Amino acid sequence: MVRKPTSNETARKPNMREAILAAAEELFATNGFNAVSVRDIAHAAGANPGSVTYHFKTKDGLLLEIYRRHCGPMNLRRSELLAAARRVRDLQDRLEAIVRAYVVPAFTSGSDLAGGGARFTRLRAVMSAEGNEVARKIIAQTFDDTSHAFIDAVHESLPHIPRTDIVWRSHFLLGALYYSLVTPERVSRLSRGEADGSDAAGAIEQLVQATVAAFQAPALDQAAPARRRPAVSKT
Amino acid sequence: MVRKPTSNETARKPNMREAILAAAEELFATNGFNAVSVRDIAHAAGANPGSVTYHFKTKDGLLLEIYRRHCGPMNLRRSELLAAARRVRDLQDRLEAIVRAYVVPAFTSGSDLAGGGARFTRLRAVMSAEGNEVARKIIAQTFDDTSHAFIDAVHESLPHIPRTDIVWRSHFLLGALYYSLVTPERVSRLSRGEADGSDAAGAIEQLVQATVAAFQAPALDQAAPARRRPAVSKT
DNA sequence: TGATCTTTTGTACGATAGTACAAATCACAT
DNA sequence: ATGTGATTTGTACTATCGTACAAAAGATCA
């Protein structure tokens, strides 16, 4: 009854396709898309360049598959956590739980396949900065639903804040999130060793605390939008 | 007395060196370093590829010169604004002025050479995401002083907040700032057209307001750092 | 004008990129 | 054991990359 694994599950090397995906994810996330060659990926995965073509056809196809791998599970986890957060009674606690539902899946370590993961979040950050076309399409398709759900949930907790302000603040949240994963050593450097930018738990707590406060800030005065002008010199 | 300009100031094409710098800045900022070829830059500047080699020796040298152009004036402007902000009497107003001193120079339009500028800030964001080595060195050398001055100023306005928290929150500020310049259209999309992500003045007001609130958030409980753990599943 | 220096052009070289494809190799059912 | 389909390897093709360099063109001043 100890069924031997079929060749579809384990090839010569134990699942070379998976090794290529993992290597590509790591390399893309740290160096960007264009700086990494197919040969680099193959080498890091202990595979032959031809294998990459065989499994994913093109380099774009490889990136596409990385997104496909993660998007589903990550959004699932987020919506579960968001649903749970919505049920929190206390309004202050609920807002914090909502923010946490957004942040935590993005930070969980790279080893768990079905939770998002820091490596994949960092990959998204880098692709967004590079203006990668393949990524841009998937992101808009896959993540806008999640973002809207998040914004709606925050808006429910803070009905007196205009939706526009909440959009901006959640945009800032994502930017801070991305940057924390892209350049964690900067935190260590600027704090002169007092804080560790690579400590996910610490980063999450700091980010959640700061974001909750930002969301709770008074609404921007939108009655006189012309009043905003003088602050910025030119544009 | 109408001195004719010497050849150092205006070449055949009116200052081709400047045109190359501008084209490179624009292309690097929107596509990343590796995705842009020297030939792309030359073409965009109406120049010959050889001219780029002549003026800047290497592609890295070109990037280096872009940084050299901007870092000095940008930090000067920031420290001027910061000095002025420090003199604000009211503590709440002072904090806001300090944040504004940090944010405004980063957002000013690309046409002004000596103020930093949105294009250059966006360039820095993209280089940081790509992990560009040339940029990383300059950044650490040039911007850490400014960052420390900023952190110190904020810390003076909020003496009861531990420095570590302020470092984290100013790190989030920079991430939000970068992301707002990298993906402004996301704000327009998520707000369903109600907000314009490309409107610098609006972005500044939103960012300043949110950041001031984040800085003013209560300090993280650091007496029991072990208590933080259970929130994040794995790492 | 002619000599000299600066800048631009045109072209070429070696390295590396993404990808295609035939041959070799493997797992497995018969 | 052998045939079959899936995978891996090795290699090669074409395109493009950064950069070098000689020749052309322009500017400057005796």
Image (cartoon, coloured by chain):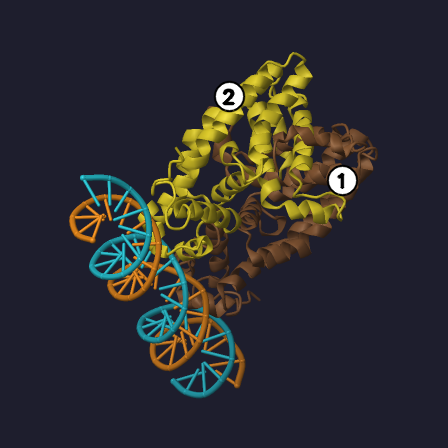
Chain colours: A brown, B yellow, C orange, D cyan
The label on residue B149 is 2
- Position of residue B54 measured from the top left corner of the image (x, y, whole percent): 31, 49
- Position of residue B122 measured from the top left corner of the image (x, y, whole percent): 54, 42
- Position of residue B187 measured from the top left corner of the image (x, y, whole percent): 69, 44
Residue at 66% over, 25% down: B212
Q: Is residue B89 above or below residue B36?
A: above
- Determine whether, in the image, residue B129 is placed left or right of residue B104: left
- Determine whether, in the image, residue B219 is placed left or right of residue B190: left
Q: Is residue B166 above or below residue A2?
A: above
In the rendered structure, the residue with mark 1 lies on which chain?
Answer: A
Q: Residues within 10 Å of mark 2 (few under 14, many from 20)?
A: some
Q: Is residue B72 above or below residue A9?
A: above
Alpha carbon distance from label 1 to label 2: 32 Å
- Identified by mark 2, the residue type is Ala
In the rendered structure, the residue with mark 2 lies on which chain?
Answer: B
- Can residue B231 be seen from the camera position used here? yes
Q: Quadrant of the C terminus of chain B?
A: top right
- Position of residue A126 measured from the top left corner of the image (x, y, whole percent): 53, 47
- Determine whether, in the image, residue A74 is placed left or right of residue B47: right
Q: Nearer the viewer, residue A202 or D2?
A: A202
Q: Quadrant of residue A97?
A: top right
- Can residue B221 be seen from the camera position used here? no
The label on residue A164 is 1
- Identified by mark 1, the residue type is Thr
Q: Nearer the viewer, residue B77 or B154?
A: B77
Query: The residue tagged with tag 1: helix, strand or loop?
Result: helix
Residue at 53% over, 64% down: A61
